[in-house]
Amino acid sequence: METVQLSLSKGFAVITPRCLYRNDFSEFREQLEALPHKLCAFGAGETLWMPGEYIERVYYIERGIIKTALHDEDGTKKTIYFHGPNSVFPGCHQSQFTIELSLVTTAVTPVTALEFNIEQMQRLLQRSPDFSQAMLESYARYINLLIFESAHQSHHRALVKLCNLLYLLARDAAPDKSGLQRIAFSQEELAEILLLNRVSVARLLAQLREEGAIDTRRGAITIIDEDRLLSHCSLEVR
Amino acid sequence: METVQLSLSKGFAVITPRCLYRNDFSEFREQLEALPHKLCAFGAGETLWMPGEYIERVYYIERGIIKTALHDEDGTKKTIYFHGPNSVFPGCHQSQFTIELSLVTTAVTPVTALEFNIEQMQRLLQRSPDFSQAMLESYARYINLLIFESAHQSHHRALVKLCNLLYLLARDAAPDKSGLQRIAFSQEELAEILLLNRVSVARLLAQLREEGAIDTRRGAITIIDEDRLLSHCSLEVR
């Protein structure tokens, strides 16, 4: 797991917000495979969660990345989070919320997944306290990310928001051969996470490139100088 | 419970976002009372969760209202949610998040509560699938509220945001003797939920009063004409 963990004197491992969820359910893979399920494959751009759907199917992502966005009545799309390998999406609870009608989940890359129905997942939650605990922890992570988004990101300047996001994504990214952290998200995807327009994102990325904080060649953003990037971030992510 | 539930043809009860959590744990009151605990009382304005604290104590609120706000490094306070009678605050999970260092919870009214340590709560989660399920549902509600906040509220105009909030708070409020829904939050409290300044909130409330949507006498906001209020709301709360 690439989670950022800061060890505190109190002995806690403290976790910064994550936009990309993965490996949180690795240890339950065998238990899940033993449940009745369907193997699924989705091409990039295909929809896993359709607009207007309630939670009826739950996925264990084996390979690939999916993204979940909220589509507003005015046409705005706001990406909320990404799920990668060994994550369970969207989770498993009984209440159905109106907001779920506006959520759309699509494959960013080709995806393979195990598909379960929610009743089977709920039975597993009932009989496995450890699985139940893992689900609660993953919900706590969503809450952590969303509180960060809602309270901090909303009133920061665009540059601070973008630098916060790049820093979080870089910490979630596996380093490439040269040890650099590559962020494989497009400018459009970054814009949809931050509710900025693409022109603003391109302008801010150009500024960061000129400062020597990042490189933007070969279809990915690479962090060149983490300290310089961090100097623009808000305190809560450092 | 005053939760708004819309029955759909599919048989689901669909829940709109709530800012005020209460009665979600009423059925566990006896089980919780049987655990070792401490009785606590807090005066209005007193702090239940101090800045810089991690989750070590969990409360079952018996009476009163508490509010949780995120205090940003730049001095901004953003109220996230309120907890009332028969709710469990802040919840119970194992991960500790950096964001928790910026959260501050204070009593809005005089509060009485049962205080538990987190280890005892975690043992109850392990042995009671129903309690665990209720905790998961309450986390799902937080996520629901926060997705609503993060994605919808962030780009709405101030009037839409305020009307959305008044509508949600009114649905959570018990009607008064004349059957009207009274919202007992101050203009300052509303401003801190919406990250608006007080002058803007006062101006928007004056507009709604002139339109006949609300009344603002006797230290509370009363919804007079719900349809008129709703006409300003965004679709996802209607």
Image: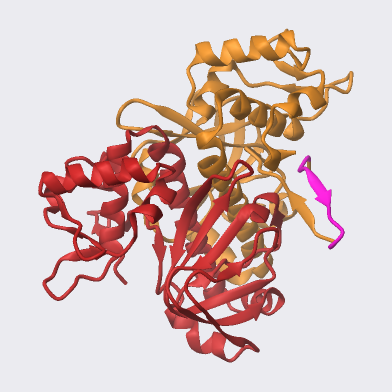
Chain colours: A orange, B red
Q: Position of residue B78 (x, y in %)?
A: 50, 49
Would you identify the image quadrant in which residue A235 lies? Answer: top right
- Residue B230 showing in the rendered view: no
What range is drawn magenta here? A2-10
Q: Position of residue A91 (x, y in %)?
A: 54, 52
Question: In this rendering, is residue A121 above or below B37?
Answer: above
Camera-side residue: A168 or B6? A168
Residue B232 is covered by the magenta coloring: no
Counting the numbered discs, the total is: 0
Would you identify the image quadrant in which residue A162 lies? Answer: top right
Q: Main secondary structure of the magenta part?
A: loop
Camera-side residue: B163 or A123? B163
Q: Position of residue B110 (x, y in %)?
A: 45, 78
Camera-side residue: A113 or B117? B117
Q: Position of residue A218 (x, y in %)?
A: 72, 8
Left or right, residue A28 beside residue B64: right
Question: In this rendering, is residue A219 above or below B83?
Answer: above
Q: Residue furthest right?
A: A178
Left or right, residue A112 beside residue A52: right
Left or right, residue B169 beside residue A168: left
- Residue B173 showing in the rendered view: yes
Question: In this rendering, is residue B165 above or below A216?
Answer: below
Would you identify the image quadrant in which residue B171 lies? Answer: bottom left
Q: Residue furthest bottom?
A: B34
Left or right, residue B180 beside residue A88: left
Residue at 47% across / 48% down in the picture?
A: B146
Camera-side residue: B35 or B129? B35
Question: In this rendering, is residue B232 above or below A64?
Answer: below
Q: Residue furthest front?
A: B199
Residue at 40% across / 74% down in the picture?
A: B23
